[in-house]
Image (spheres, rainbow, N blue to C red):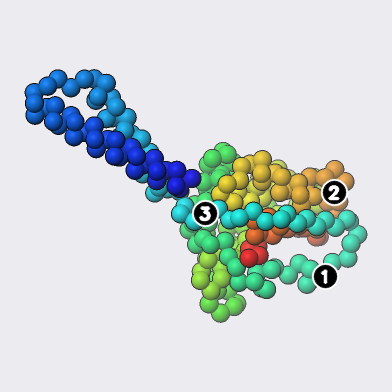
Amino acid sequence: MQYLFTTLFILSFIAFFVFLVLMVLSIRKHNRIPIRHVMLTAACFAIASIGMYGMLTLPSNPPQSSGTDQTEKHESGTATTEEDHAPLAQKNASSFHMTTEEFKNKFNGAVGKYRLNGLSITRLNMKDSSEQDTGAFEYVFNDKLRLVGKLNSDQKVQEVMLYGNGDASEPTGGTLLTAIATLILTTNNEYTYNDAQNVIQDIGLLDRDVSQSEFDGATVRNGFEYRFSIQEDISTFGITAVH
């Protein structure tokens, strides 16, 4: 997409410059400038402006290559250990390739694009991490939903966790699912809301026979692991960079 806007800007700017020179020459010769000539010049300028705007606003990094989707689902009653739930960030120093400010802006951008009212992040609460040269942040949406993130040594977001509490015997709340979809959109620039729902489906969270008292499902897409689990009325959704 970046190359498209760059090409659009260059071609439109050249055309605008040529039309502008012709207009100046016509004025100096005291010739009448056709209305069509003026409109073409204005159109070229507008297209060049759109190209420049796209060059400045779109990220310069190419979208991450799509990898093989891997899905693992565990039925209710499956025994789990603390090691099973240990964040992959402890084993891998990869990151989302974005700072906390970029993460907040992308999250709010998804909220605004899909009109997900009530989920905007105003200011992340930065915290000191127990590990050297790393950091952490937190944001509380309400008394039942909060976001926690971890930074690597380069101060780039490495992992985010979403915690929701409530009665595990009831179906997963709509606000929690919306927040999960927003986080998925934040980590994938090319994803639509339907793509985010497909990730949630891959985890197994939307299956009719999902146990709301004990659940653990995960999937890997484009270098990120997405995991959702329920234990003791606490629903946890995490995204970890795995490359």
Which residue in the protein does label 1 denote?
81
In the rendered image, residue 43, in percent from the top left (x then y), is placed at 32, 29
Q: Quadrant of residue 95?
A: bottom right
58 left or right, relative to 86 = left
Q: Residues within 10 Å of mark 1 (few under 14, many from 20)?
A: few
Whether residue 123 appears in this view of the structure is no
Please, is residue 49 above or below residue 76 in the view?
above
Q: Residue at x 85, y 49 (%)?
A: 210
In the rendered image, residue 213, in percent from the top left (x then y), is placed at 85, 54
Callout 1 amino acid: Thr
Of tags 1 and 3, the one toward the viewer is: 3
Callout 2 amino acid: Val
Which residue in the protein does label 2 denote?
210
In the rendered image, residue 221, in percent from the top left (x then y), is placed at 68, 55
Which residue in the protein does label 3 denote?
62
Q: Residue at x 91, y 59 (%)?
A: 77
